[in-house]
Image (spheres, rainbow, N blue to C red):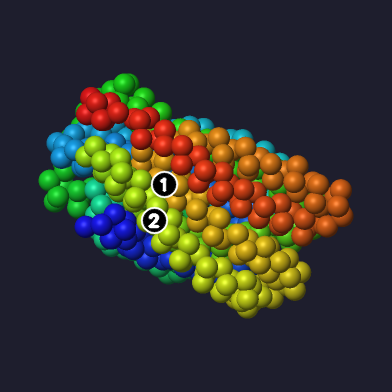
Amino acid sequence: MTPARAVWSVAWPMIALGLLKSSYFLTDSWFVGKLGDDALEALGGAAFAWWMIFTCTELPGVGVHALIARQEGAARRDLIPATLVQGLWVGLGVSVLLLACVPVQSAYFDLLGFSRDSAAMGFGLDFLGVSLATALALVVHTVTGTAFRALGETRTALVITSATLAVNAALDPALIWGWGPLPALGIAGAAWATAVASAFGAALGLVVLARRGIHLLPAPPLPQRMGLIARIGIPVTVAGLGFSMVYVLLGRLITDFGEHHIAALGVGHRLESMAYMVTVGISVGAATMVGQHLGAGNVGRAEEAARAANRLCIGFMLPIGALLFFGAEVFFDWFTDDPEIIASGALYLRCQALVFVAMGIEVVYEGAFSGAGDTMPPLVVSGTLTAARIPLAWLFAYTLGMGILGVWIAIAVSTALKGAVLWLWWQRGRWATTLSNAEVAA
């Protein structure tokens, strides 16, 4: 099988899965939007914090993916159960740290500029508190799902996650609005629905792994193995946290122009996720095939797989970008009838649609670096250029007097730069020797 066909065979179920997730995020926003503009503003503001939580739960998954892909490529499936168990130990530590953030969650909304006595602040605390307290379910679901992706069994991952999203979508209206014996929990119901569905997906994943002959037996934490998993995953997590924190700081600037812009950004991110999730699906294909080819000792095939994933991503981003650019107002009309939110959101979406190709290149090569176990370059590139959004936004919005349009342009410019720089860094070729097969088999 050619590298292009191999990448596609892994990527297409993940692309389908990404589109399903995008549909869920949009449905979630629709349900919450029916609670009023305050709830929609809270969801938009909390979205950055939720992304931080999700990024943290991905930490063990990144390391586990790199190791299992190498082990599969080296025909060492016997090592996979122990890798998963140690990944779960790392995940437990992550979930404990997230739980410890519950008492200080109000500081997050203070940074965003939310008023302490506002309805939006109350909604946001309800949602974020539940999300932090139930992160363990999400992290176990992430680690088990990673195993299937690393093995190249993305169709199985698609089926499991589709079932998880179906449970989530069914619980959303029941827990948000109340149904039968279930109380109306408002925006917190959306967080509870995600937690219950994640627990269901984790349990289902463990059952399917056992049927594949991968039995997870209790084992004590092994510091050296956990350290290797964390070493690979931490740079990606730090980059993701930095990305989200930049948006928190940008949020303070954005609210200076009106709180409706935060709601516009929140919905815009969910619409933009249709493109982003496609790139993530292809990125998984790149990560899996790069890792497996390196595990088999074939650097040339690994490099060809990354190039094939990049071409595939560009082919998807062009039509999706055109769709969201020309249909921006129509899409926003689905979520709100507030003309200010619609106008700001459409402007944001059009700016980002222009750089979807660059976003795709960035995410694909993040996956390729991750599959190689070389996660420092994405941290450096993403961390530096995402942080640059703050001075760029200030320059465009205030110094050049462009207002909120300047903020949206700053985000787009930095996205274009990240894609270009990460592609150039990949061409250096040092990713091929960062993680040795001896470390993987140790």
The answer to whether residue 324 is seen in the rendering is: yes
Q: CA distance from mark 2 to mark 1?
A: 10 Å
In this figure, which residue is indicated by the disc labeled 2? Answer: 309
In this figure, which residue is indicated by the disc labeled 1? Answer: 367
Instruction: Indicate the quadrant containing the N terminus: top left, top right, bottom left or bottom right.
Output: bottom left
Q: Position of residue 128 (x, y in %)?
A: 56, 47
Q: Nearer the viewer, mark 2 or mark 1?
A: 2
Three-letter amino acid code of the residue under disc 1: Gly
> Circle 2 sits in a helix, a strand or a loop, which is it?
helix
Which quadrant of the view contains residue 94?
Answer: top left
**Residue count near mark 1 (Cα–Cα under 10 Å), binned few <14, some 14–19, many ≥20:** many
Establish if 416 lies above or below 341.
Answer: above
Q: Position of residue 200 (x, y in %)?
A: 31, 54
Q: Residue at x 68, y 69 (%)?
A: 346
Using the image as rendered, state which of residue 248 and residue 152 is in the foreground.
152
User: Does residue 128 appear to the left or right of 96 in the view shown?
Assistant: right
Three-letter amino acid code of the residue under disc 2: Ala
Q: Residue at x 19, y 48 (%)?
A: 209
Which quadrant of the view contains residue 95?
Answer: top left
Q: Residue at x 55, y 49 (%)?
A: 419
Instruction: Indicate the quadrant containing the C terminus: top left, top right, bottom left or bottom right.
Output: top left
User: Does residue 322 appear to the left or right of 258 in the view shown?
Assistant: left
Establish if 60 lies above or below 182.
Answer: above
Using the image as rendered, state which of residue 240 and residue 180 is in the foreground.
240
Q: Position of residue 206 (x, y in %)?
A: 23, 48
